[in-house]
Image (cartoon, rainbow, N blue to C red):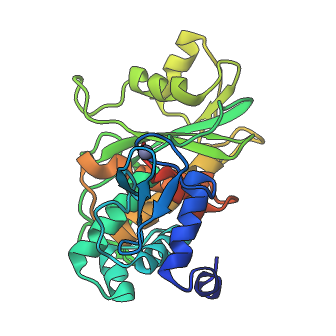
Amino acid sequence: MTFLDFLEKFPTEEHIIQHFINIRYAGNVTCNHCGSDEVVRRKDKKKVFRCASCRNDFSIFKDTMFEDTYTNLRKWIYALHLFINGKKGISALQLQREIKGSYKTSWRMLRKIREAMGNKGDVSAQFLSIVEMDETYVGGKPRKGNKKNGQPQEKHKRGRGTSKIPVIGVVSRNSQQVHARVALPNKEGKKLTGKQLMAVLDEVVHKSAVVMTDEFTGYDFLRKKGKHVHLKVDHTKEYAQGIIHTNNIESFWATLKRGIYGIYHHVSAQHLQKYVNEFCFRYNNRNTNMMDLVLFQSIYK
Ligand SMILES: [Zn+2]
């Protein structure tokens, strides 16, 4: 959606309310308490309906990301538009400039949108046939004098064995979907274990799938377990050996890191999964109407 499309589609708050009613109630508002469709919109409060059956008032935004908001809905939708369409996301500071609100409001809006993005899980079906698995290491402050275009330079050792936070990811070549999990420090220290890698694989990958990884010895567990056919590419020898490569997951990591270092600058381990979900959402839904999907996922009950 371009900015002009946005203006045309949502010229007033009422257009947004109607759009949301279509998404949440398929066009016909029913009572949040008893389910009756005998409801009347209140004239004094535009977002509130009164139920003729149970006599309760309810807001169409109850249990959604718009609950308790005083921010104009057009600002919300515009924020959503910017957040979704920016490949790397948008910072609270950038959003504040765009919508002319307070920093705190922008920050809260982004947090809520990000929550909605991660609300329904990141993949719609199991990964079949060929999957690529890899890990990356995120975090730590960019080192001084080691920046290029505002991004920290990749370390040659790719972070393995450093204090950065590992993120484990799988891409399905078939469905072009990604699934990624932050691996928080385990009992064995910060080293990634086969168990952690396997757990991520088990969440989304069908047991018949062929798994492609790089030469990292952590993936040797795959052969030992015998659950999957495992093919390795040795990056020290060549970049890719025919179909044996991990290019898709590596390009996802590149986007994730550009976003985290370039837009968000620093993300703590505790919150990293939410940002990872944001980038998974954009990647997995790049061919769908992301705006409507976020609105739909922002309904929590
Ligand atoms: Zn009712």
Task: Count the numbered circles shown.
Answer: 0
Split into 4 quadrants, where in the image is the N terminus?
Answer: bottom right
Q: Regarding ligand 1, which quadrant of the image does it lie in?
A: top left
Split into 4 quadrants, where in the image is the C terminus?
Answer: top left
Residue 88, x across and y down, in percent: 48, 68
Q: In screen coordinates, is 219 left or right of 105? A: right
Q: In screen coordinates, is 129 left or right of 98? A: right
The correct choice, above or below, for 27 with respect to 90 in the image is above
Which residue ends up furthest to the right in the rendered image?
Answer: 242
Residue for point 57% across, 52% down: 25
Residue for point 30% across, 45% down: 165
State the residue in front, 144 or 183. 183
The correct choice, above or below, for 58 with respect to 227 in the image is below
Name the quadrant containing residue 150: bottom left
Residue 42, x across and y down, in percent: 41, 68
State the residue in front, 131 or 25. 25
Residue for point 48% across, 74% down: 77
Residue 72, x across and y down, in percent: 37, 79
Q: Is residue 251 in sight in this rendering?
A: no
The correct choice, above or below, for 188 with respect to 27 in the image is above
Residue for point 56% across, 72% down: 85
State the residue in front, 53 or 9. 53
Name the quadrant containing residue 193: top left
Q: Is residue 61 in sight in this rendering?
A: yes
Residue 251, x across and y down, in percent: 58, 56
State the residue in front, 294 or 128. 294
